[in-house]
Amino acid sequence: MKKAYVIGHITVKDSAKWREYRNKVPSTLEPWGAELVFRGKLDSVLSGNHAHHDTVVIRFPDSAAVNN
């Protein structure tokens, strides 16, 4: 089976709520065998526009786990 990745681009409007939410994320991923791979902030845009400031990457065991 091949791993599947979900990439999320996020705009944080309330940093306190975002901090509370992101601390809960790992436990919400467990039922699907997923794990948080990367969470980071935008450093620069090399081409075009990008309106979001944060990015997350989540790894799932396969694409079926993403779609469940």
Image (tube, rainbow, N blue to C red):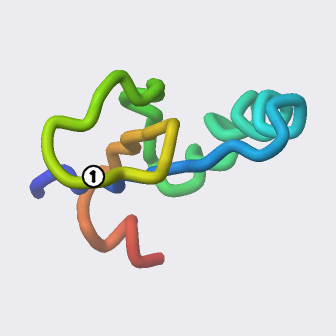
Residue at x 14%, y 46% (from the top left corner) = 47
Residue 23: horizontal and vertical position, in percent? 75, 28
Residue 45: horizontal and vertical position, in percent? 25, 37
Residue at x 20%, y 53% (from the top left corner) = 48
Residue 63: horizontal and vertical position, in percent? 26, 68
Residue at x 30%, y 53% (from the top left corner) = 49
Quadrant where the image shows the N terminus: bottom left
Which residue is situated farthest in the bottom direction here? 67
Residue at x 61%, y 48% (from the top left corner) = 11
Q: Which residue is mark 1?
A: 5
Q: Is residue 60 left or right of residue 34?
A: left
Total of numbered circles in the picture? Answer: 1
Give the crowd class for mark 1: few <14, some 14-19, many >=20 residues within 10 Å: some
Query: SS for tag 1?
Result: strand
Q: Is residue 38 left or right of residue 2?
A: right
Q: Quadrant of residue 31?
A: bottom right
As displayed, is residue 50 above or below residue 44? below
Nearer to the camera, 54 or 3: 54
Q: Is residue 54 left or right of residue 6?
A: right
Which residue is situated farthest in the front direction here? 48
Nearer to the camera, 15 or 38: 15
Residue 10: horizontal and vertical position, in percent? 55, 49
As displayed, is residue 12 above or below residue 16? below
Q: Hey, what amino acid is under mark 1?
A: Tyr
Nearer to the camera, 46 or 10: 46
